[in-house]
Amino acid sequence: MWRGFCLRQVLSFSQPPQFARGPAVCALQCTGVSCFWPTLDPPISVYPWDVSRKPLCPKSPINPSKTDMKINKVKNHLNRLIPKRSFFNVNTTTSAAHSVATILNPKATYCIGDKLDILLVARDYSGQRKKYGGDFLRARISSPDLKAGASGTVTDFNNGTYLISFILFWEGRVTLSLLLIHPSEGVSSLWRARNRGYDKVIFTGQFANGSSWVFSECGLVLNTSAEMCPYLDPRDQEAFYCVKPPHVSCEALAQLKSKNKAISYLSDLEKSLFIRSNVGVEILKSFHPVSVSVCSKQTISLKEKCKPGMWSPVPTGYVWNNVWNLVTCNLSHFHTETQMNICLKGKLIYILGDSTTRQWIEYFIKNIKTLKSIDLHGFGNLRRQLVVDLERKIYIQWQKHGYPLVGSNSYSAKENEYIARVIDRIAGDKNTIIVFSLGQHFRFFPIDLFIRRAINIHKAIERLFQRSPETRVILKGENTREMNDDPERLSDFHGYIQAHILKDMFQDLNVSFIDAWDMTIAYGTNNVHPPQYVVRNQINMFLNYIC
């Protein structure tokens, strides 16, 4: 992972960044994924709101509030952390094949728990040493025969050198991997392209007009002078618009779908950095596996049982025999239907988010036969789902987060509800659990939208805890996805930024965290919908937090 991008300083302006002394330089160092939460005063005011007027395209506020100014400061800081890297020839960008990696203080055999460090010197395709950092790297160790894996950490010295660190968690032959996901020049290009505008996705609204349908363009921002239908949340300053069809009421919007617009903010030269052969290239091809043994003098420290609200540095855990183990605490195992039923008895569970949380309710339905689905008369994969076990008083509901929802299949526009509003209508008690996640559908749009949404949810959880401090809240972080899926819109670089924002934003609340980013790197899954064995281990963490 890219550890030189230290997010805590982005939002916490009163705290200086951490520095690690490197070879003749000071380096930004994030010791784990937690590098980020500030004190913000949501909601973020990005657009002027006057619902009494004919809606126009959103513009910057004329008189920005304190929150507006802080958000602008956040964005400016992000821009400084991801500086513009111009290039005129691909040969001057970072090359995985020409970069040089060296194990520091190598050993013939390592002990379980040892730290293994690698110094990486980045070079371009001409063999010239890079003079700046910012490459997006992913570090991982694995033992396929043992079904074992863990992420590593990357420290960026901002001069073309990096320190990659691994903790050796298990015995056996361990393979080292360091992928160059994108060179720094590619990262700069993606960041610029992401924040250019909201027009990479075309939304189509389907309006009911008697016995027929009328279709109209919709979006988070519409560049048009036509009359529009505004679907606004004035309190949280969330917005979605449709061009108003002639002689049709705005309330007649029934369904939505979307597709990618044939637009790119990358030049042809920049696009060449994102062809499949240039994404996720192995740097450590010539490295042999290292040998790890149980050393006689080693003592095993006892770990406490995992509890709600516990946060861990990266790597948060490791996989062994396809089972996820946390570094800081012991996880119990809820793998049988009986164990899950005992844990879930009497629980009211709200699962909110995208299709990666929908995998959870699908897992429950498949593996707990006593749960019965209730037909809520929705349609499509994004319909609201409810399962119950009346005898054990188990209630589990999944529903999608509000706009944006990107996909070619139609879904109901009437069931769109922002997560903050859902949380606001939950009374809460000691048997109420809320799981939420967001990320994948936001990668298409400027970062403002994601930050604003996350802050609105943060404020909603604060209000929830004021009326019901016993309610338990679990944040499922964003996971990695396919590397060959439209990097301009969907690169894991976008997800990485969002994953860190979410993780660090909620650390000041009594919220439990499932680090799906670290987990999917450890498992080595590059799939927007992780395999069932990964979902099973996410749910096992969830059950540990509520039982």
Image (cartoon, rainbow, N blue to C red):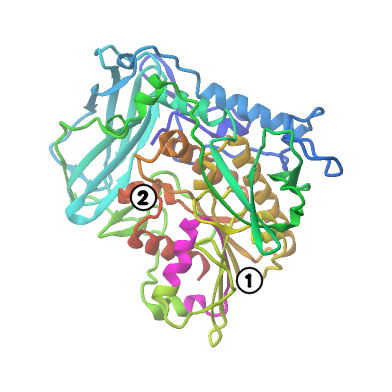
Where is 225 relative to 314, above or below? Answer: above
Image-quadrant location for residue 39 = top right
Residue at mark 1: 430
3D distance between C-alphas at marks 1 and 2:
35 Å
Residue 113: x percent and y percent? Answer: 28, 46
Question: Is disc 2 placed on a helix, strand or loop?
Answer: loop
- Residue range (magenta): 342-364
Reply yes or no: does residue 28 show up in magenta: no
Residue at mark 2: 527
The residue shown at (67%, 33%) is: 223
The residue shown at (38%, 19%) is: 269
Q: Nearer the viewer, mark 1 or mark 2?
A: 2
Please state which of residues 264 and 311 is positioned toward the viewer in this rendering: 264
The residue shown at (66%, 27%) is: 73
Residue 153: x percent and y percent? Answer: 37, 37
Residue 443: x percent and y percent? Answer: 51, 40
Residue 383 can be seen in this image: yes
Question: Is disc 1 placed on a helix, strand or loop?
Answer: loop
